[in-house]
Image (cartoon, rainbow, N blue to C red):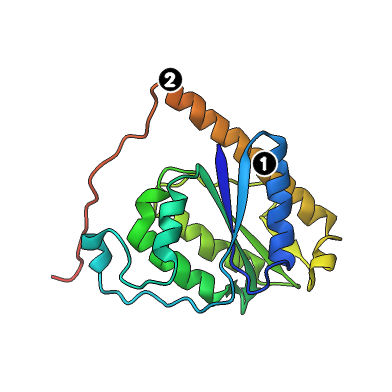
Amino acid sequence: MKVLLINGSYHEKGCTYTALAEVAKALNANGVETEIYWLGQNSVNGCKGCWACKKLKKCVIDDGVNEFVEKAAQFDGFVFGSPVYYASAAGALVSFMDRVFYSGGRALAYKPAAAVVSCRRAGASTTFDVINKYFTINNMPIVGSNYWNEIHGNKAEEAAQDEEGLQTMRVLGNNMAWLLKCIELGKEAGVAPLTEKKIFTNFIR
């Protein structure tokens, strides 16, 4: 079993990384492989709304999103992390997730996911909500902890002092490992989600 943790911060080893690393540590202790994927400092284009991905099965913009979708197909669970910017997720991560889920949501569907957010003081709950909405529209079980998945600090060394936040991350990792093992047992028993073809309703008549 493998979990991909996405660091949506502009800073490679900042507060968001500190939180994700704690989740990864707990997952590893449960025998789950992990990889932290950093979006980097390059610009991420927003979705054009062209819908070409529905026909091509990939995004028409070539800036790493398609490669990520291919990578995601090899993983069993995901943790998306972001700093708080104006009570929301980092713009690059939002653009990235828009296009990943539009063009390659099939690679993530039915796999457990979690959002992790870092902030200095406030805005964590709204950011948490923004990221979670991607999962709820893509048939993905959301993994929780003993508190909302947030950590506080202005710098990595400050986040490392947030004992409650670090515990929240460890519990999240343990819960993710538990759910992955439950799903694996279900697969061995022949249990799979029932699916239906999507119905689209247009309210404009």
Q: Which class describes the residues within 10 Å of circle 1: few (<14), some (14-19), or many (20+)?
A: many
Q: Is residue 92 visible?
A: yes
Q: Is residue 146 visible?
A: no
Residue designated by label 1:
27
Q: From the viewer's side, name the closer residue of 99 and 161.
A: 99
Task: Give coordinates of residue 90: x percent, y percent.
Answer: 57, 74
Residue designated by label 2:
189
Q: Amino acid at mark 1?
A: Leu
In the displayed structure, 201 sits above or below 174; it is below
Residue at 66%, 34% in the rendered image: 31
Q: Which class describes the residues within 10 Å of circle 2: few (<14), some (14-19), or many (20+)?
A: few
Task: Give coordinates of residue 86: x percent, y percent.
Answer: 61, 79
Task: Give coordinates of residue 120: x percent, y percent.
Answer: 75, 73
Q: CA distance from mark 1 to mark 2?
A: 24 Å
- Considering the numbered disc 1 on the image, is that residue within a helix, a strand or a loop? helix
Q: Quadrant of the C terminus?
A: bottom left
